[in-house]
Image (cartoon, helix red, strand yellow):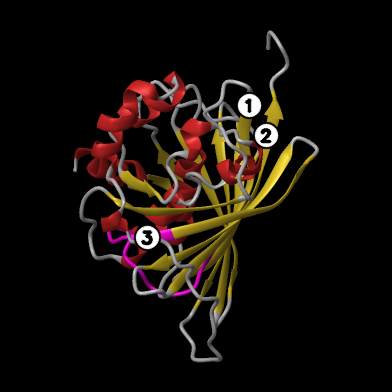
Amino acid sequence: MSAVADLLKILDLEPLEKNLFRGLSPQTGWQRVFGGQVVGQALVAATRTVDGRPPHSLHGYFMRPGDPKTPIIYEVDPIRDGRSFVTRRVVAIQHGEAIFSMSASYHLDEEGYEHQLDMPEVPRPEDLPDERTLKEQLMPTMPEAIRNYFERERPIELRHVDPMRYLDGKPRPPYQSVWIRTTGALPDDPAIHQCVLAYASDMTLLDTALVAHGSSVFSGEIQAASLDHALWFHRPFRADQWLLYTQDSPFAGGARGFTRGRIYTVTGELVASVAQEGLIRRRRPGA
């Protein structure tokens, strides 16, 4: 619960002036700000300037690594307020330079045609080992980078459908599925759940581009970083209940990997879609 409380605190931006907000980063020892944090905080900033409409999409670009020791300033540009759609542009600034930019669109709820791709058949979260069990069974055999990651208290619980891929180093088809939820209850405000999902949507996604190569972002041989991120909200959901994040990577090349994700409730409702391209550069010897 303390990790969830910290996440909610991080997403509760400080208003500085009209359309201007300040966000902080957790002091966990990371050398750069987690990309999902910046996406989530930017969505909070944009949403606080919009009345009566939920976000339906966001598109962002990561420009520079964020410094976790320094507050991030979020400047919102209210580009358009229409009768059905509202558009906002957000720039995240540190040390006088833009580190991230995002456009977000908001839409009044309307009735229309409906269809969706079915959720894949995977084990349910209660049939998979929880993180505590994985730690007890696998921690002694984990590489140091993975062990350090799992040892931290995190606000998002992950249950990988195929956790062994991080240990056996075998190439697999470029797909993976992960159940996600917060480790504690969230307030009922739908905007909080959307911003928390924006935060979580950057987790594990780029790693899908390395599944086909028997590697992961935890490998010391890989320099990995999100380059852009797009998220579409389809239906209401709760981020403190299990969501299946099913992912694929149609292409990797030129030191970049392209990945996509679909997010479902346990009852099979498609609630969000994600796309991302990221850097997956092989480190040079001695770098």
How many numbered discs sit on the rendered protein?
3
CA gap between label 3 and label 1 equals 30 Å
Q: Amino acid at mark 2?
A: Ile
What secondary structure is found at the residue carrying circle 3? loop
Q: Amino acid at mark 3?
A: Pro
Tell which circle, 3 or 2, labels the residue nearer the N-terminal end: 3
CA gap between label 3 and label 2 equals 29 Å
Q: Is residue 199 left or right of residue 135?
A: right
Can you tell which quarter of the image residue 255 is in? top right
Question: Decide: marks 3, 1 in contact (CB < 8 A)?
Answer: no
How crowded pointer 2 is (Cα within 10 Å; few <14, some 14-19, many 20+) is rated as: many
- Which residue: 39% across, 33% down? 25
Q: Is residue 180 left or right of residue 33?
A: left
Which residue bears the numbered disc 2?
Answer: 280
CA gap between label 2 and label 1 equals 6 Å
Tell which circle, 2 or 1, labels the residue nearer the N-terminal end: 1
Q: Is residue 23 left or right of residue 111?
A: left
Q: Residue furthest right?
A: 254
Magenta-tinted stretch: 231-244
Front label number (3 vs 2): 3
**Residue 123 — which label?**
3
How crowded pointer 1 is (Cα within 10 Å; few <14, some 14-19, many 20+) is rated as: some
- Front-most of 221 and 36? 221
Q: Is residue 112 left or right of residue 181?
A: right
Above or below, 201 against 88 in this view is: above
**Residue 222 — which label?**
1
